[in-house]
Image (tube, grey):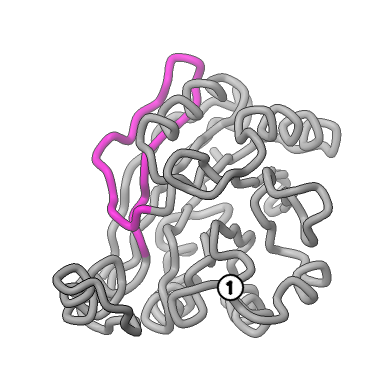
Amino acid sequence: MIRILFVGDVVGRPGRDILCGRAATLRAELGLTFIVANGENAAAGSGITSAIVKQFCDAGIDAITLGDHVWDQRGFDAEIGGLERICRPANLPAAAPGRPWLLVERDGARLGVFTVLGRHFMPPRDCPFLAADRVLGELRAAGADVVLAEIHAEATSEKIAFGRYLDGRAAAVVGTHTHVPTADATVFPGGTGYITDVGMTGPYDSVLGREVQPVLHKFLDGLPRRFDVASGDVRLSGAIVEIDAATKRTASIRLVTIT
């Protein structure tokens, strides 16, 4: 059995601390083959830096995905090409720097990982469905045993449709971006494990990881404000996916929350 912990959007220092502080223990306690984390909010809530990528890798994170905040940290576009365990969204323009997918190996298992950005209520991107077709072919050619796909999107309908589109072709499809975990973990008929959103890893005494009062006031008067990362009620939220290595089908998928 290949057991994967996919960790939802890591928000700021609180999210980094709980992920890096618990990764090794969780791997041992849960018998994890791989730990994959979305790091697009890891640097003060927006983007990621090469130093944080190194911190994650040193903590034992096998693969790091990104989202719509991929270029928020100045200079990261010049650094991403030299970082091995991180991939940018696969449906960005082909000329964008960075890897569109990852192939990581552990305990004899080769896991393909990629993410796509949704198009509803988000800036225009290349088609995530067609990008997934391309990447799945490239990962098969590269020798991936199983593939975990992430869709970083606003609309639940788009996420569910994407999961159904990949049913039987990817071992699992997980959703991110809204920072709110959903209760719909399931295995589709073709053997693909699916969940619409795994939630965020960070402070839940917040509004999506940010201090409450500035966000409230922005809604009330519309004036711009700085939204600092909050600090209370820090949780690690994600999904544990168990994949049968022989059939390449997901045996189980469940939401997990760790405090």
The x and y percentages for residue 116 are: 59, 44
- The prevailing secondary structure element of the residues shown in magenta is loop
Q: Which residue occupies 45% across, 39% down?
A: 120
How packed mark 1 is, by other alpha carbons closer than 10 Å (few <14, some 14-19, many 20 or more), is: some
Q: Which residue occupies 28% across, 54% down?
A: 180
The x and y percentages for residue 91 are: 67, 43
In the figure, residue 18 lies in which quadrant?
bottom left
Q: Which residue lies furthest to the top in this view?
A: 189
Q: Which residue occupies 61% across, 78% down?
A: 73
Residue highlighted by disc 1: 72
Left or right side of 220 for 157: right
Q: In this view, does 49 lie above or below 219?
A: below
Give whichever of 234, 90 is nearer the camera.
90
The x and y percentages for residue 81 are: 82, 67
Q: Is residue 177 above or below residue 112?
A: below
Left or right side of 89 for 102: right
Give whichever of 130, 189 is nearer the camera.
130
The x and y percentages for residue 22 are: 42, 74
Q: Which residue occupies 43% across, 79% down?
A: 12
| Magenta residues (range) | 178-200
Q: Quadrant of the N terminus?
A: top right
